Amino acid sequence: MKTFQFLVAGGLLAFSSVGIAGGGSRCEALTDGLLKIWPLATCDEFKQIKRVERIFEDTDFLYEAYPGAPSLCFEGQLTGKLGTLPITARALSALTANGFDQTVAAARGSQVITAASVVTVSSAQPGKKVKELGSLFFRDTAVAFVVNPAEPFQPYVYEQLISVSGSKQFAGSSASLQIEGYEFASPPEPATQTPPAKVVGTICQ
C-alpha cells in the first residue's frame, strides 16, 4: 500500500523566478517561500472549488478514475514574501491523468507527476489582521526522486507551476512558480524529519 501511495502521490507547490511579463505588467517576486503538503482523506473540497469556480473542466483527475483510492488530493501550507509583503497561503491539489511513459523515470528511481492546484494567498503582516488576497489556479508538473528507499514518503521534488486563472487581487494575473525539496509531510505535522521545500516565483498583473 505504501508503494502504491507514493506512485500516485505528488502534486503541488514551489516557485522559481521565471516570470511571465508582458508590456506594462507589474511583477512581484515570491521569495523566502517554504512549503509542506500532506495527503487528504478525500478530494471533496477540491471538487467543490472546481464546481464553484468552473475551472479545470478540461482536465481528467485521478480521483475520477480511481474513486476512493488514497493520496489523490493534497493540502499544503506556504509561507513567504510577495514583494515586501509577508504572506501565508493554503494550497489544495488534485493529481491529474497524463500520458507520460514512466519506464525511464522509474528505472532511475523517479516519477513524473501532474496535478492541478488552487493556492489561496493571505497577507500576514505582524500586528495586522490576516486578509485574504485571492486565489491562483495552477497546472503542475513535477519529478519526484526517492533519495532514501527506506523513506518512500519523503521524495525530493522538482516542480513547476503555471497559472491558468486567478480571483480577487489575482484576477487577470499570470504566474510562474517552482518548488524544490522535500515537500511531503508524513504525518501532516509542523515538525517533520525533513526541512520544508523551497518556493520561489513571479506573479505579474
Image (cartoon, rainbow, N blue to C red):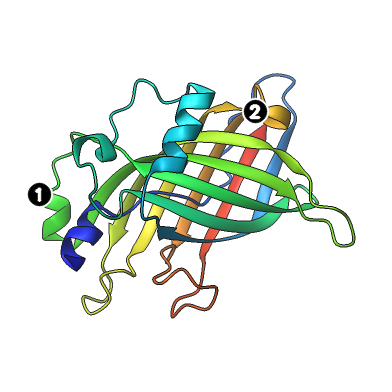
What residue sits right under mark 1 in the picture? 103
Judged left or right of residue 94, residue 5 is: left
Q: Residue at x 55, y 73 (%)?
A: 190
Provide residue 4's location: percent of width, then percent of height.
17, 59
Provide residue 160's location: percent of width, then percent of height.
44, 44
10 up-or-down from 175: above or below: below
Q: Residue at x 34, y 70 (%)?
A: 154
Dot 1 lies on which element?
A: helix
Dot 2 lies on which element?
A: loop
Instruction: Please tell me which of labels 1 and 2 falls first in the chain.
Output: 1
1 or 98, nearer to the observer: 1
Q: Residues within 10 Å of mark 2 (few under 14, many from 20)?
A: some
What residue sits right under mark 2 in the picture? 167
140 up-or-down from 53: above or below: below
* Residue type, label 2: Ser
* Residue type, label 1: Thr
Provide residue 79's location: percent of width, then percent of height.
65, 59
CA–CA distance in space, label 1 to label 2? 38 Å
